[in-house]
Amino acid sequence: MAPGGCRLSGALSFLLLAAWLALASAESYQKFLREHFDHPPTEVPDRGRYCDLLMKRRHMTSPHHCKHLNTFVHADTSRIIAVCGEGGQPTKGDLRESAESFPLTLCELEKGSWAPDCRYRVSDSVERIIIACEDGFPVHLETEVPN
């Protein structure tokens, strides 16, 4: 093998790893958007059924499972992404707390509700959020911060 062969192979391996990490990060961001982003808020005929509709539509319920808790953020993606930069402060580990508050809807599974008929309690608030970021994009909503 030529002396440069190992370097090319190493460089190719590095590029493939970088491409795989970028793809994984992009998929994590898309999952974040599917699970937590709703701007402008989806209009529903009965506001009390907002969570029932979105949790099902966003594939967070199934015939055998109801996700117990989920928060939707009602803000432009640029405002949410900003928390990964100057719009947020580092907290614990890879988490960042937003400097500003966001309109939120908390969906909490009602007691006695079972799949496939998942029923949620709807709570609206305006609070700061804590998110995890990868490559400058949100990939996980940890929690909201009570004002």
Image (spheres, helix red, strand yellow):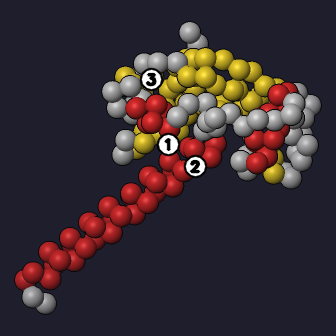
Could you tell whether 14 is left or right of 53 in the image? left
| Residue at the disc numbered 2 | 31
Depicted 75 relative to depicted 30: above or below: above
Q: Position of residue 61 (x, y in %)?
A: 78, 47
Q: Which of 64/122 is in front?
A: 122
Could you tell whether 122 is left or right of 1 in the image? right
Q: Is residue 92 visible?
A: no
| Residue at the disc numbered 3 | 97
- Mark 2 residue type: Lys
Tell me the residue at 88%/45% (across/down): 115
- Mark 3 residue type: Glu
Depicted 134 relative to depicted 142: above or below: below
In terms of sequence position, does the residue under pointer 1 or pointer 3 come before the other?
A: 3
- Mark 1 residue type: Val
- Label 2 sits on a secondary structure element that is helix
Pick the quarter of the image with the C terminus: top right
Q: Position of residue 36 (x, y in %)?
A: 61, 38
Measured Cα–Cα span from mark 2 to mark 1: 7 Å
Q: Is residue 44 visible?
A: yes
Q: CB atoms at circles 2 and 1 under 8 Å apart?
A: yes
Q: Residues within 10 Å of mark 3 (few under 14, many from 20)?
A: many
Tell me the residue at 92%/31% (across/down): 112
Determine which quarter of the picture holds residue 69. top right
| Residue at the disc numbered 1 | 139
Determine which quarter of the picture holds residue 125. top right
